[in-house]
Image (cartoon, rainbow, N blue to C red):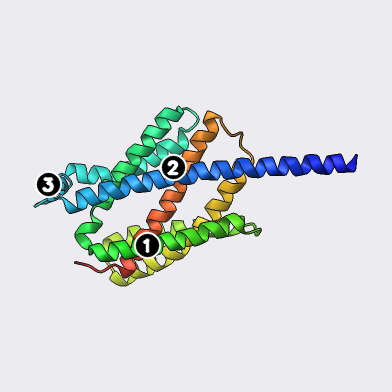
């Protein structure tokens, strides 16, 4: 009898692990898709003066330029708060539109930094993200408390960034970037662990789970992009 119970529990654990892996695979696939779209759009707009002119003119930022800077924030809010009311098709569409707008927004880095430094910092960011993602997936340590502290630090970063937007302090900017690297490196491990645990509890194959995978991809996408931008501000070579 006991052996049958043990076999049953082992079978359930294997099935749960398989569902979790499948869920995470979907999350990372969506994340990679979004990063690919953003990267292509950023490169096209950042290296083509005719396309870039839609975002920046001789007199400064255009209306479209301001729109692509701030619209992604609205899309994140909509996808997060209205997930239950949106269909999977609508979630997918919003996520892809978000990736395009983020790509247009990221095209500004090609005006500021050299192509070589962008490529090298991107590679470093990918390596750091990959290491922390593996750590978050494999560790048996509960990272919930760490995640809470990191979220508090993130709020502090946002407040400090708003203040520095008026102060224009290069020293404070460097400090904010340095702390951001630590925060988003840690959040990567925390979010991967959270998504792994979430994947073990969902019912795979449902529309709700598919939408949850897109939200998970959005979370990891933001972790990576913010890590990349923080490193670029610290180590990027300006043209």
Q: Residue 231 at what x, y percent from top left?
A: 36, 65
184 up-or-down from 32: above or below: below
| Of callouts 2 and 1, the N-terminal one | 2
188 up-or-down from 200: above or below: below
Labelled pair 2, 3 in contact (Cβ < 8 Å): no
Query: Could you tell whether 72 is left or right of 213 in the image?
Result: left
Q: Which residue is drawn at 61% across and 40% down?
A: 19
Res 216 seen here? no
101 up-or-down from 122: above or below: above
> Residue placed farthest to the left in the image?
58
Distance in Å between CA atoms under marks 3 and 1: 28 Å
The residue closer to the viewer here, 35 or 219, is 35
Query: Could you tell whether 228 is left or right of 56 in the image?
Result: right
Q: Residue 67 at what x, y percent from top left?
A: 25, 42
Distance in Å between CA atoms under marks 2 and 3: 30 Å
| Of callouts 2 and 3, the N-terminal one | 2
Q: Which mark is residue 161?
A: none
Q: Residue at x 50, y 30 (%)?
A: 84
Residue at label 2? 30
The residue closer to the viewer here, 208 or 128, is 128
Residue at label 1? 123
Query: Could you tell whether 180 is left or right of 63 in the image?
Result: right
Labelled pair 3, 1 in contact (Cβ < 8 Å): no
Q: Residue at x 29, y 67 (%)?
A: 236
Q: Residue at x 25, y 69 (%)?
A: 237
Image quadrant where residue 233 sits = bottom left
Q: Quadrant of the N terminus?
A: top right
């Amino acid at each position: 009898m006991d052996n049958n119970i043990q076999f049953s529990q082992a079978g359930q654990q294997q099935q749960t692990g398989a569902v979790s892996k499948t869920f995470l695979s979907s999350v990372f696939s969506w994340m990679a898709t979004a990063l690919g779209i953003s990267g292509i759009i950023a490169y096209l707009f950042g290296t083509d003066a005719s396309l870039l002119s839609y975002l920046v003119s001789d007199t400064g930022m255009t209306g479209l330029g301001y729109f692509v800077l701030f619209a992604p924030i609205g899309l994140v809010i909509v996808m997060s708060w209205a997930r239950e009311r949106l269909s999977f098709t609508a979630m997918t569409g919003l996520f892809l539109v978000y990736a395009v707008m983020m790509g247009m927004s990221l095209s500004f880095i090609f005006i500021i930094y050299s192509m070589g430094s962008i490529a090298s910092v991107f590679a470093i960011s990918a390596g750091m993200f990959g290491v922390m993602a593996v750590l978050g997936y494999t560790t048996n340590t509960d990272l919930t408390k760490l995640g809470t502290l990191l979220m508090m630090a993130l709020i502090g970063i946002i407040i400090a960034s708003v203040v520095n937007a008026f102060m224009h302090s290069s020293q404070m900017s460097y400090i904010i970037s340095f702390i951001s690297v630590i925060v988003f490196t840690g959040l990567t491990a925390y979010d991967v662990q959270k998504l792994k645990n979430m994947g073990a509890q969902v019912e795979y194959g449902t529309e709700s789970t598919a939408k949850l995978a897109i939200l998970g991809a959005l979370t990891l996408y933001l972790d990576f992009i913010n890590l990349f931008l923080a490193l670029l501000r610290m180590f990027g070579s300006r043209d």
